Amino acid sequence: MPSHRQTSSPNFDDRGVAPIDLLLLHYTGMPTAEAALARLCDPASKVSAHYFIDLDGAVTQLVEENRRAWHAGAAFWAGARDINARSIGIELVNPGHEWGYADFPAAQIEALIELGTAITARYDIPAARILAHSDVAPARRQDPGERFPWARLAAEGLGWFEGALTDAVPGSALHEDLGHIGYDLTSVEDAVTAFQRHYCPHLIGTQSQGKASAETLATARALSAHVRAS
């Protein structure tokens, strides 16, 4: 387990009986790390996470893993709605789309890889269940966003990333594949955009955003097949 600092947040409760089978990644989305950490520890905010990783890679634990931190909000994945009860939440310092979205520094990502490797091994979390906040709340959230280096994490065994695919499988039904992967299909366009932020980030901000492009179809089919086989 990586060494880390401890700062207690009061914003947690009991997990209940759900297994821990998700790792959920966020960005802080605030102008400074100090402001973000203060909010995560403020009882009035009713927001927290298990871990907080600063730009220099310093890791702070805010909530014990056996407690239910309040980081996902209203969310859904693969039939489950109480995502907080079955996940470990990690906040990465980044100003986010509202305050000058930036690349994630190498030191921060290296610390995340070390921490995430320990967590996923401890709970045997599958690659396809290492998720973005936007994956579980596609209509509300964008984080950690299209600048997040998912391919870098996948190369270290943290998550799934097929790379650029262009050939759609005949008969591909995008909404069916996304539903099988786990997405909430209340708004299919939001689900497609969230999927692209994670697996086809270069499509964000293009005419293909939120659309069933050939690459999106092929990538969703490949991930759906991976989920079926795992």
Image: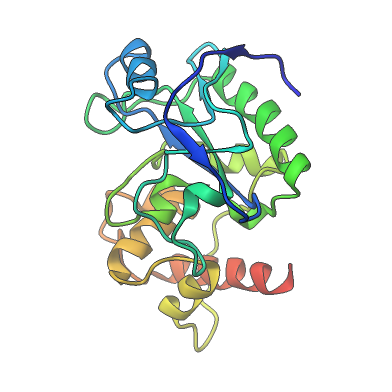
Is residue 166 visible to the viewer in this orientation of the structure? no
Is residue 48 visible to the viewer in this orientation of the structure? yes
Q: Is residue 93 left or right of residue 204?
A: right
Image location (x, y in percent) of residue 182: 50, 66
Q: How is the image coloured?
A: rainbow
> Could you say which is closer to the camera, residue 62 or residue 196?
62
Considering only vertical position in the picture, is 163 above or below 6?
Answer: below
Q: Quadrant of residue 3?
A: top right
Image location (x, y in percent) of residue 42: 33, 20
Q: Is residue 133 left or right of residue 23?
A: left
* Quadrant showing the N terminus: top right
| Residue found at x 28% / y 53% | 206
Disc tally is: 0
Image location (x, y in percent) of residue 127: 67, 53
Image location (x, y in percent) of residue 221: 56, 73
Q: Residue furthest left?
A: 98
* Quadrant showing the C terminus: bottom right
| Residue found at x 61% / y 56% | 18
| Residue found at x 43% / y 58% | 195
| Residue found at x 37% / y 14% | 33
Q: Is residue 159 left or right of residue 24?
A: right
Q: Quadrant of residue 50?
A: top right
